[in-house]
Structures are given as structure tokens and as C-alpha cells.
Amino acid sequence: MSNLEDLYREVILDHYRSPRNRGELTSPPAIRVEGFNPLCGDEVVVYLDVRDGVLVDIKLTGHGCSISQSSSSLMSAAVKGKTIEEVRETIATFKQLMTVPRSSPDEKSEVTPVDLRALGELAALQGVVKFPVRIKCAMLAWNTLGQGLDELA
Amino acid sequence: MAAGHTVTSFDPCRVRADTPLLTRVVHDRTITYLDSAASSLQPRAVIEAMSRYYELRHANVHRGVYQTANEATAVYEGAREAIARFINAPGGANEIVFTKNATESFNLLAKSWGTANLKPGDVVLVTEMEHHANIVPWFQLRDVAGIEVRFIPVTDDFRLDLSNIDELMKDVKLVSVTAMSNVLGTINPIKELAAIAHRCGALLAVDGAQLVAHEVTDVADLDVDFFIFSAHKMLGPTGIGVFWTREETLNAMPPFLGGGGMIADVRIDGYTPASGPARFEAGTPPIAEAAGLGAAVLYLESLGMANIAEHERGLTADALTRLAFEFEGRVRVIGPGDTVSRGGVISLDVEGVHAHDVAQVLDQFGVCVRPGHHCAKPLMRRFNLSATARASYGPYSLVRDTDVLLEALGHAVTMFG
Ligand SMILES: Cc1ncc(COP(=O)(O)O)c(C=O)c1O
């Protein structure tokens, strides 16, 4: 069962059972973006309160599997209080973490290895990459957040 | 031989031995296949029939003069006869149209029969438990032809609610209903629905995709007007489906797809369509798939559909009882709790665990179940669910499969505690 334990780390189960930053913000002024995974019916709504280039507050609602729900909870904890630039960097780093490595180890990987320490608790999601169908679950909230930032611009 | 009623030699262990995929080992465990409602596994006889066609008889069908082309045509047309016998089509093979799958058969029904016979204000009555294949083509027709699509509701105990049927039948020209729900396992009262439809001057179309591999099917006895299914859910290959209607109805339907094979004549000022099933089979048909489907029918007949039905009912009864007792209410079955008018499809809602996580944990035990909405979103909405994990049986299933399912479910429940 080691593969499973790799996927469902304790941190993930914890965020699934008690999700952080759950709730809504009044919109407007907050930005409200919906994300949807038509294949499995997972849904996420992200609320962003951005002031002077800083993500002062973030709230999430929605439903879905443990991977999509814990990923959105972990994301909210990771990006809250950061500047928009830092948030974008975190999104990029997380996307990298979710990129399937080249199958042949000899081949030069185009993906630069991710600094797991910089990711903090988010690193718990690295096991997802071994379950390709679940990557889109983990990415749902992040893509939705990215969309929200694009609306800002 | 009539549709398998007379045969006695049914042994699920033999069926298992006939099915190569069941020897697969995944994650260090022999596979436990519980996803026959999505697609069933092929016995060696089906795979070999397809190989034999490619190795010895490959040629395009119809119009060929040489030996192998004649053999290919015989294989293809032989499958049509086998299907006619299998569902007891009163007019025989002339009433069997081969399509790509059940979904294409529904599109043929809506786009050909529907366009020719329905006018603005006419109603097509479906049910809340339909697969999207029996919903979306009607919405598409609504958008171009102004028909209304109406739904028979589903009761809290997972049956069709016919209490208000007289009112629902107003202006209905076609009732289109699944014989067995691919989510709930519920088997619907098709004979009764046929009587209701006919009394109101409407026709009855039946989605047989789930029923056909699990119960004896007799379209004449059921008195239905259209019957639709896919080969891959009845031990056959993917890529071929069936559309049945009575010969006179079929010959009055306008062509669907156009091209070679479906014409009687083509001139520079137009074309004349062929008659019979050919009218609806444009282009080179799925010949190898028909060979496989023909073999699947022979195989099912040799097992006996009544025997399969009884075997799967036993498995379902056992599973429902154990599910009700082993998880202290944490695992809820979304479907009838007994085996009266119910097939071997068991949808599970595990408290506090999303269906995808259930299926993921089960996969580590080599257990194949399907998580999701099962292409029945109106039904999921009806029961306030976003997804279920669905286990389903086939003729090769054994109580041992249920044992592994329950063991793995127990693990999922503990893990997400
Ligand atoms: C009840 C029912 N109808 C229709 C279909 C569609 O079958 P296919 O995907 O082969 O067209 C399915 C299969 O998922 C089904 O279960």
C-alpha cells in the first residue's frame, strides 16, 4: 500500500477533514472565480481580496475528492498574504511539481527540479504526480486562482 | 435454439477461465473486475472470432465477388441474424441496424425517426434515470424542431414514479426509457410502459444497454417499438451497437448518415436510398466487430441468459446484505435494497469519502470500480450526489470478487476515518 500512503499523506487527509480558509467574501469588492472539473464533477469557488498588489484574503467553497479539496486548502494557506507576484511564482512552482517527469531517466529533463523545502506543506501533494488522472484534481483550485489573477490584470 | 432458455451448462468459473483479462495482476493482486456496467470483458471466443476475420477473411463486405469477400459478408450478415435471434426480433435480421454504439443508435432514432415524425409541441417522455445518450439527442432535437422533453420522476426508493403518468402522457408521441439503470440497477416495467404508451397512441423506445447482457430479452414479448444497445456491454467488442425496430417502421424512416452502402442509386440530380438496414449503414461497417458480436451472442446463448440472470441476482443479494451489515451505515447503496426488479449494478456512497478516493483505494487492491456521475447527471442531481463509486457484475463474477471489494472498502473507510 506504499503508493497509497504516498498519495494520501497525513497532511492531505488533515486538510481534507478540516479545510482552511473555507467560506465566502463579499463580491464585489472581492473577485469571485469558479472552477469546474466536468469529468468528475469537482467544483471550487475562489474569492480573492487584493489590495495594493497583495492578496490580503482568500476564501474557498466547493466540493470534490480529497485531492482537490486538500489542494485548495493547502493553496489558500500558502498564498494568503503574499504579493501577486509571489502568488504567481507559487502557482508556477506548484505546476512544476505536478508535471509528470520524463519516463526515461537518461533523457535530459526540461523540468528543473522543484525546491521542495520552499514549498512547505504543499510538498505533501508531490505523490499525486504518480497518479496521472488525479493531477487535474490537484490543479483545479490553482488554475482557478490563476484565472482570478488574470481577471485582475 | 431459442434465446438461450434451454441451455444448462453454466459455470461462472469456466466463464472466468474463458476470459483472458481476468488473469491480469495489478499492484501485485489478481484483478477484481467490477466494472461490467461500463464495459464487459471479452471471452477468448470473441477475440478469436475477430482475429480469424483479420487473419483469414479480411475483405470489405457486400458487392465482392471473390471468396474471402463472400466470407466477410457472411460473417457480417451472420451477426445480424444472431442478434435478431438473441432479442427475438419478429421480422428477423431485416430489422437489425448496426451502428457504432448505443449512443449512435439514439442519435439515429432522434435524428431520423424524430425529425420525420415529431412536430413543434410534441413531447418525448424520458425519465430522470436516463443515461445522457437518451437525453442529449432529444434536447438537440428540441433545439431544432421545437419538441418538448419531459421527465418521469424517480421515487425516493429508486423506482420510476408512475403515479402521475396519465398527466405526464399529454401530447407524448414517444416514451424513451432505460430497461435497467446503469447507476441504480433498477429494472423498469417495460411491458407496463409499452401498454401505457400504446394506449396513448405513442411509441416506446427502450435503452437496452444494461439489460441485454443480464436478462433474457424478447422485444416481441415486451411489445416495444425501438430497442437499442451496445456490443461492448454484452461481452462483445467496442465499436458496434444495435438499433432495432419493426421492419415497417424502419422502412418509413429517412436515411441518417449519407454515403456509400446506404444507396440504391446515385445520379447527378440526386440519390435513392437503399431499403432495409443498409439504408442506415453508410460507409464500410465495423466488420471485425460484427464478427466479435456474433461470437458473443453464441457464447451468451451457450451459458443461457436465464442462468446468467440468476447467478448475478445471487451475487447482488449477497453483496447488498453484506454492505448493509458490515459498515454500520457508513456505506449507503444508491439503488433498491433488494433484488426485486434489480440488476447487478451497485452504486455506493461512502460517508465522508469521495467516490474518486474510494476508487483510488480500491485500485490498490486490484479492484476495478467506476467513480463519477456515470453519464446520468439529472439522476445524480435528483439524489443530491456529485458522484458514486459503482461496482457491477458480469457472468464471470464470483462471491470472491465481493470479498475483495468489501476488504478494500473497509480499508477506505478506515483510512479516511
Ligand atoms: C444505460 C446506458 N445507456 C447507454 C449507454 C451508452 O453506451 P455507449 O457508450 O456504448 O454508446 C450506456 C453506457 O454507458 C448505458 O449504461
Image: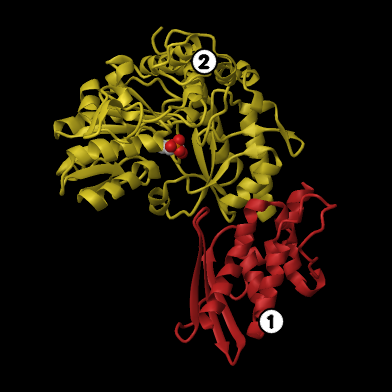
Q: Which dot, 1 or 2, sits closer to the camera?
A: 1
Q: Which chain gets the yellow colouring?
A: B
Residue B215, by quadrant, is top left
Q: Which residue is mark 1?
A: A86
Q: What chain letter is assigned to the residue under label 1?
A: A
Which residue is outermost to the bottom? A52
Amino acid type of disc 2? Tyr
Q: Which residue is mark 2?
A: B299
Amino acid type of disc 1? Glu
Q: Which chain gets the red colouring?
A: A
What distance separates the C-alpha of mark 1 from that of mark 2?
Answer: 63 Å
Quadrant for the C terminus of chain A in the image: bottom right
The local secondary structure at tag 1 comes to helix
B370 up-or-down from B71: above or below: below
Using the rendered image, report if marks 1 and 2 lie on a common chain.
no
Does residue B218 show up? yes
